[in-house]
Amino acid sequence: MLIDTHCHLDFKDFDGDREDVLSRSRADEVGIIINVGAGLESTLRSIELAEKYDHIYASAGIHPHDADVTNETGLELFRSYLARKKIVAIGEIGLDYYKNISSKQNQKKLFIMLLEEAKKKDLPIIIHNREAHEDVFAVLKDVMGSKVKGVMHCFSGDCKILKECLDLGMFVSFTCNITFKNASVLREVVKEVPMDRFLLETDAPFLAPQILRGKRNEPGYVKYLAEEIARIKCVSFDEIADITTKNAKRLFAL
Ligand code: NI
C-alpha cells in the first residue's frame, strides 16, 4: 500500500473526473490520501471529501498567499474546522517568498498564529516553504521549540537545510519533481534522508512525473515517486512502500 500524504483533489482540475481519478489511485494501491487545505474554502472542501470517502483524510490550512486577506473572522472559521472529524494535520502553512503574494510581515504573523493552533491541538504540521528557509526555521524554533511534529512538504533545499529539518525531528517529503531531468541536486538530497523520515506526496494536480511532464498529476502517480526513491536508495519498491506507509501512519496517527 502507498499513502499520498499531500494532494489537492478538491481543486477544480478534478471536477470532471474525480471519481475516475480515485478509482485509478485505488488500482495503483494508494490506500490512504490526505487532502491538504490550501485556504479556508479548500479546507472545507477537503473536509467534505474526507467525510465522503473512508480512505481520505483532511488537513486544515491557510496558505501564506492568503495572509494579507485573512482576518479574525477567517481565523474563527478556521478554528471551527479543526473540530471537524478526520482532520489529521494543520497545513499547508508557512512562508512563500518566491511569489510574495502577501507581505512578508503578514505571512509571518499568520504562520505564527497557525502554529499556535497546532500546538494547542497537538496536531502535526505540513509546511510550505519557498525561498524562505531562514525565516521558516526561525519561526518554527521560536514557536515550537527544539522539536517539531511535522513535515517539510515538497522539499526543495540542499543538504544543509535537510539537516536542520532532521535536527528538529521533522519528516521530509518529496514530490514527483525528483523525477525531473534537472533534479540531480534533489536526488543527491534524497540519498541523505534516513528511511524513517521519508513521506511520499504528489501535490496533485501539480508536479506530474517526468514521463507525464506538463500533464495533470494525480494520487495514483505516487508510484512513480516511490520507484524513483527505491532506485536512488538501492532498495525495493515494496520496502519504500512499507516504510513510507509506516512513517505517514506514525506522523498523522492514521
Ligand atoms: Ni500543496
Image: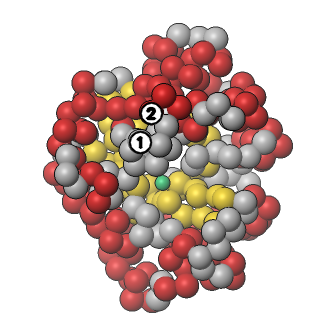
The residue that label 2 is drawn on is 212
Q: CA distance from mark 2 to mark 1?
A: 6 Å
Question: How many neighbours does mark 1 have within 10 angstroms: few (below 14), some (14-19), or many (20 or more)?
Answer: few
Whether residues under marks 2 and 1 lie with C-beta atoms below 8 angstroms apart, the answer is yes
- On the picture, is 154 further left or further right than 140? left
In the picture as drawn, the residue positioned furthest to the front comes out as: 214
The residue that label 1 is drawn on is 215
Q: Secondary structure at mark 2?
A: helix
Question: How many neighbours does mark 2 have within 10 angstroms: few (below 14), some (14-19), or many (20 or more)?
Answer: few
Residue at 57% across / 17% down in the picture?
230
Mark sitting on residue 48: none
Residue at 40% across / 31% down in the picture?
221
- Residue 120 appearing in the image: no
Image quadrant where residue 131 sits = bottom right
Looking at this view, is 203 or 246 the one in front? 203
Coloring scheme used: secondary structure
- Residue 160 appearing in the image: yes
- On the picture, is 139 further left or further right than 214? right
- On the picture, is 123 further left or further right than 149? left
Q: Position of residue 242 (x, y in %)?
A: 46, 20
Residue 241 position (above or below residue 54): above
Residue 137 position (above or below residue 102): above
Q: Position of residue 154 (x, y in %)?
A: 58, 46
Residue at 40% across / 48% down in the picture?
205
Looking at this view, is 121 or 25 the one in front? 25
Residue at 68% across / 35% down in the picture?
183
Q: On the rendered image, what quadrant is the N terminus found in?
A: top left
Residue 240 position (above or below residue 98): above
Residue 134 position (above or below residue 207): below
Q: Amino acid at mark 2?
A: Leu
Q: Position of residue 218 (x, y in %)?
A: 36, 40
